[in-house]
Amino acid sequence: MEKKKVAFICVHNSCRSQIAEALGKKLAGEVFDSYSAGTETKPQINQDAVRLMKQYHGIDMEETQYSKLLDALPPVDVVITMGCGVQCPWLACSHQEDWGLEDPTGQPDEVFLHTIRQIEEKILHLRDAILSGEI
C-alpha cells in the first residue's frame, strides 16, 4: 500500500498543526506522511508547544519543522483542519475533516497537554482508518 500524504492545516501553522505533524510522524509514519501548513506564518513555532512536545514525546519540532504556507505542501490525499474558526482554503484531496480543536496558545500547560493528548488520539484513529481502508 502506498503511503497517503496528510496535511494538517491551521491559520498560523505554529501550534496545533505543528503538533499534529510531529505526532503523525512519530505515531503513524509507517502509514502516512505528515505535513503542516497555514494561511499565514509565524516567525517560530509556539514555544510552549515546542517545550511540552520535547518534554513528553522527546520530539524537538524546531529541528525538523517550521511555519510554512499552503503552497509549500506537496499534493496530498487527506486534509485535516484543526478547527480554526475561519474558512480554510480548499485543497484538492480525497478526504477532508475538521478536528475542531481550540488553540491552546497563551493557556497554562494543562491546556496544552490536553490538546496534545486530543491530537494524539485523533492521529491514532486516523492511522487506523487509513489502515482499514476507511480513508
Image (spheres, rainbow, N blue to C red):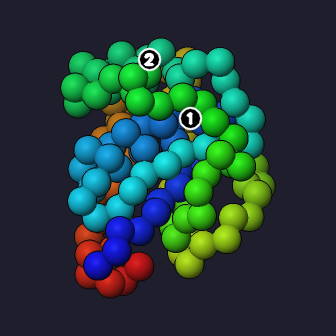
Residue 108 position within the rendered picture, expressed as x and y whole percent measured from the top left: 43, 17
* Numbered disc 1: secondary structure: loop
- Residue 114 is left or right of residue 70, and the answer is left
Name the amino acid, label 2. Answer: Asp
Query: In the rendered image, is residue 105 in sight?
Result: yes
**Dividing the picture into quarters, in which one does residue 97 lie?**
bottom right
Residue at horizontal 52 percent and vertical 21 percent from the top: 46
Residue 27 position within the rendered picture, expressed as x and y whole percent measured from the top left: 24, 50
* Nearer the camera: disc 1 or disc 2: 2
* Numbered disc 2: secondary structure: helix
- Callout 1: 10 Å neighbours few (<14), some, many (20+)? some
Q: Nearer the viewer, residue 55 or 111?
A: 55
Q: Quadrant of the N terminus?
A: bottom left
Whether 132 is drawn above or below 59: the answer is below
Name the amino acid, label 1. Answer: Asp
Q: Nearer the viewer, residue 8 or 102?
A: 8
Residue at horizontal 67 percent and vertical 24 percent from the top: 42
- Callout 2: 10 Å neighbours few (<14), some, many (20+)? some
Whether 134 is drawn above or below 37: the answer is below
- Reading the image, the residue beneath label 1 is 103
Q: CA distance from mark 1 to mark 2?
A: 12 Å
Q: Nearer the viewer, residue 37 or 109?
A: 37
- Residue 99 is left or right of residue 39, and the answer is left
Please tell me which of labels 1 and 2 falls first in the chain: 2
Q: What is the count of numbered marks? A: 2
Task: Give me the disc on residue 48.
Answer: 2
Q: Nearer the viewer, residue 57 or 101?
A: 57
Residue 41 position within the rendered picture, expressed as x and y whole percent measured from the top left: 69, 30
Residue at horizontal 28 percent and vertical 64 percent from the top: 31
- Residue 84 is left or right of residue 119, and the answer is right
Residue at horizontal 35 percent and vertical 62 percent from the top: 32
Q: Quadrant of the C terminus?
A: bottom left
